[in-house]
């Protein structure tokens, strides 16, 4: 497509169209070829932690079916693929010894993608911390920034010549909130004090890796955050508005503000109370590291009201009558995707942006019928959210790519295989892949560089 017709569709020439996945959710064979255990290998084996006792032992078997999956991506016309590298495959103990066989898997994946004309986008950390590091305190240990930067260097020395886009950490908020505050994700702790420390160590690790990359890297590096705009009802009280500000600081600004502005939002002292560690100005300023791009994972917004029982933020969501909700209980609200892209662009200096995840779990037919899986709500979700991205571009946000979550139905963490986010259906008994109607729709969007959104 020439650049004039590409631009006419509302998406700039070179805009990347992709799907995203993460290692533990799709790969299976978590201990193959000398890989070390991760906190997820342990978590899934702790009774009651994962719905239905599901594990990532097989997942989508992508580790063994990688070539078939890249062929599928090519068939859909993807121009980028966002995947994560399992730290424990590369360094089984998390530090020190490098496992060439584990690294080799990602080298083969990247080569296969490049052969298919697909730009690799690699995330260094998508929640699968090596268990050996967790034994040393995991994200609470002050040394973790050095461990992370060392691991990142190993990945770059093998892959930086072929991977043009690197992300350090996927959704630090989820790592700290799910892993250390509420304990619903690995490693399953429940402590506000630990959550504040883990959050800080995550951002230290991000900053240390970005600094290290400046010395050796040849490509681009960024951070991936999940943002969920917090709104109030039209008749909101002052207490509701205050709760909204706290919720926004905790979820949406706790990570981006230190990483890009060198300060924590003021409201965090109130959110964490006595659990808030008194970081010195110098310690907080050191979290600032200039990135080449920001990745946004956007799923939903939340309308909140004050709720004194909610912890750590005194806010609860209010269900919106008439709205469509996904199977994970998330309201469809594409307008908030536009608003978030514009907000990020304005607040953080007009950085290039990628939508690194966006998608929905819906109740799909359990099995393909005549080789088809019809998922009209997901098609609607994709159509409206891609439209929202286009609106943000028209209003000046520098959005350079979009990745649907997810390529395949996969292990939805503590929810097991029950919630399906894939554009491609996976039969978890036979592991057969069947592109859903949403995959076909997305393929048309890609082939027309966005024009199919208006058909
Ligand atoms: C994560 C994915 C997850 C998705 C849907 C994001 O928070 O990065 O790993 O599967 O949301 O819940």
Image (spheres, helix red, strand yellow):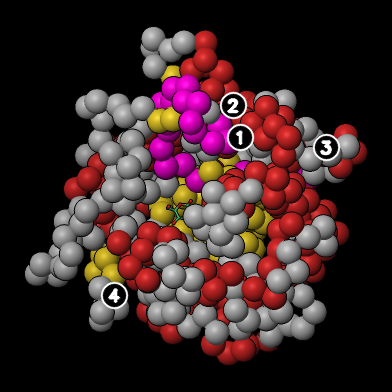
Which residue matches tag 4? 428
Give whichever of discs 2 and 3 has the lower sequence position: 2
Pointer 3: what residue? 278
301 within the magenta span: yes
Instruction: Check the image and report above or below for 446 versus 141.
Output: above
Under circle 4, the secondary element is loop
Q: Looking at the image, is mark 3 or mark 4 nearer the viewer? A: 3
Decide if residue 450 is in sight here. yes
Residue range highlighted in magenta: 288-313
| Cα gap from disc 1 to disc 2, whole angstroms | 6 Å
Please give the name of the residue rendered at 88% of the width and 37% of the height, measured from the top-left corner. Answer: 280
The residue pinned by badge 1 equals: 250
Residue at numbered disc 2:
246
Separation of residues labelled 3 and 4 (CA atoms): 48 Å
Q: Residues within 10 Å of mark 1 (few under 14, many from 20)?
A: many
Q: Residue at x 54, y 73 (%)?
A: 42
Q: CA distance from mark 1 to mark 4?
A: 37 Å
Q: 338 or 22, which lies in front?
A: 22
Name which residue lies at 44% across and 70% down: 47
Mark 3 vs mark 1: which is more N-terminal?
A: 1
The answer to which image quadrant residue 36 occupies is bottom right
- Up-down: is 353 above or below 37? above
């Amino acid at each position: 497509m020439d650049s004039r017709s590409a631009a006419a569709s509302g998406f700039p020439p070179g805009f990347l169209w992709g799907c995203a996945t993460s290692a533990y959710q799709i790969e299976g064979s978590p201990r193959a070829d000398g890989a070390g255990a991760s906190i997820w290998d342990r978590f899934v084996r702790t009774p009651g932690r994962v719905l239905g006792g599901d594990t990532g032992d097989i997942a989508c078997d992508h580790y063994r079916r990688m070539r078939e999956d890249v062929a599928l991506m090519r068939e859909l016309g993807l121009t980028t693929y966002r995947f994560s590298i399992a730290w424990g495959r590369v360094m089984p103990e998390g530090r020190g010894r490098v496992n060439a066989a584990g690294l080799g898997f990602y080298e083969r994946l990247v080569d296969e993608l490049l052969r298919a004309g697909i730009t690799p986008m690699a995330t260094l950390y998508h929640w699968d911390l090596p268990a050996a590091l967790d034994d040393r305190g995991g994200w609470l240990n002050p040394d973790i920034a050095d461990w992370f930067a060392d691991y990142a260097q190993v990945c770059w020395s093998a892959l930086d010549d072929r991977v043009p886009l690197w992300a350090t950490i996927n959704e630090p908020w989820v790592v700290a909130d799910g892993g250390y505050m509420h304990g619903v994700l690995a490693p399953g702790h429940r402590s506000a004090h630990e959550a504040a420390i883990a959050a800080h160590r995550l951002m230290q690790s991000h900053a240390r890796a970005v600094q290290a990359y400046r010395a050796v890297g040849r490509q681009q590096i960024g951070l991936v955050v999940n943002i969920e705009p917090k709104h109030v009802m039209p008749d909101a009280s002052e207490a509701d508005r205050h709760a909204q500000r706290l919720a926004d600081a905790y979820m949406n600004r706790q990570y981006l503000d230190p990483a890009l502005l060198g300060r924590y939002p003021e409201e965090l002292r109130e959110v964490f109370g006595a659990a808030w560690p008194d970081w010195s100005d110098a310690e907080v300023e050191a979290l600032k590291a200039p990135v080449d791009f920001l990745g946004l994972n956007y799923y939903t917004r939340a309308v909140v009201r004050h709720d004194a029982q909610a912890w750590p933020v005194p806010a609860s969501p209010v269900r919106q009558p008439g709205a469509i909700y996904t199977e994970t209980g998330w309201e469809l609200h594409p307008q908030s995707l536009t608003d978030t892209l514009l907000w990020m662009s304005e607040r953080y200096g007009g950085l290039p942006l990628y939508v690194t995840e966006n998608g929905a779990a819906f109740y799909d037919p359990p099995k393909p019928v005549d080789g088809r899986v019809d998922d009209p709500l997901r098609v609607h979700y994709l159509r409206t959210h891609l439209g929202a991205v286009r609106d943000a571009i028209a209003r000046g946000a520098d959005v350079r790519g979009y990745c649907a979550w997810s390529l395949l139905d996969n292990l939805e963490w503590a929810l097991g295989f029950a919630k399906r986010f894939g554009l491609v259906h996976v039969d978890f008994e036979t592991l057969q892949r069947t592109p859903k109607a949403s995959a076909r729709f997305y393929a048309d969007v890609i082939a027309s560089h966005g024009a199919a959104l208006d058909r």
